[in-house]
Image (cartoon, helix red, strand yellow):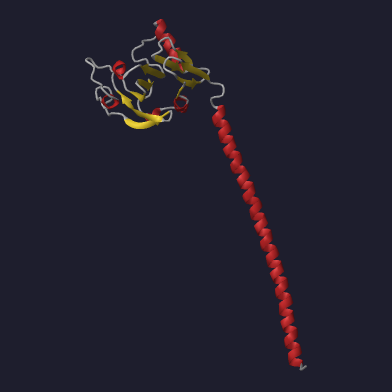
Amino acid sequence: MSNFWKIFISVIATVIIVGGEVYYLMQKQIDSIRSDNQSKMNELDDQLKGLQSSDTTTSTDETADWKTYTNTDYKFSFKYPSDWTLNSNDEKAVTVNSPENQAAKQKVDSGEMNGEGYMSDITFYSYNSLSEADGNNPKKWTNISDMISDKGYFPNGLIKTSLTGQTAYEGIEGGFGQYYIYVLQKDSKIFKVLFGNVETKDKLTLIDKKILSTFQFTK
């Protein structure tokens, strides 16, 4: 065999050996990167699961020590903070007040403060029928559409929304003042949630929203 072929074969063999080593090293580096990336992805996934679990726990714990009111006549319930005050003397108008608003109510009741314009924080109204809920004289509501479009009570009308998984209506109720309300009809009964110290939806506090979210019908 000539020297040319010996040198040629030697070069080819060297290229193959060196190429194999480079390929091996590159493949090992790629595997290492993949393993490192997978570890980071697993760690991130665990963190996300932890955040989701934390969110669920926080959401559950927010009302864990709250009190529950259940109306057996109109078959509904809701939760409210343990330091708030509930008044259910009138089953058709159950009120809940924050500590600050309850202190103001006591001053109004004692005559220490003028009660003009005083409103409970949240009032849950219940009516056996649309006619009973109709404040007009003479009565003129024949269906829920008549009610929510009555500009005498709701200057801008009420818009469709959802409450406790059912079709409801929300908006501003006018009168002596302006209050944000939710209205819904279940069977023949009418339910209204009125926020006495809130004029627009953006003024609802986190506690207002949380109390509203706990409203539900019972069996």
For residue 32, side relative to residue 85 (left or right): right
Q: Residue at position x 37%, y 32% from top?
A: 161
Query: In the displayed image of the protein, which residue is found farthest to the bottom?
Result: 2
Quarter-of-image position of residue 200 = top left
Quarter-of-image position of residue 54 = top right
Please provide percent x and percent y for residue 99: 48, 16
**Which quadrant of the rendered structure holds the N terminus?**
bottom right
| Viewer-closest of 207 and 144 | 144
Is residue 38 visible to the viewer in this orientation of the structure? Answer: yes
| Viewer-closest of 186 and 122 | 186
Please provide percent x and percent y for residue 130: 30, 19
Please provide percent x and percent y for residue 115: 36, 11
Q: Height in image: 107 above or below 14?
A: above
For residue 40, side relative to residue 72 (left or right): right
Q: Height in image: 219 above or below 7?
A: above
Is residue 112 visible to the viewer in this orientation of the structure? Answer: no
Q: Residue at position x 64%, y 51% from top?
A: 40
Q: Height in image: 66 above or below 35?
A: above
Q: Residue at position x 24%, y 25% from top?
A: 151
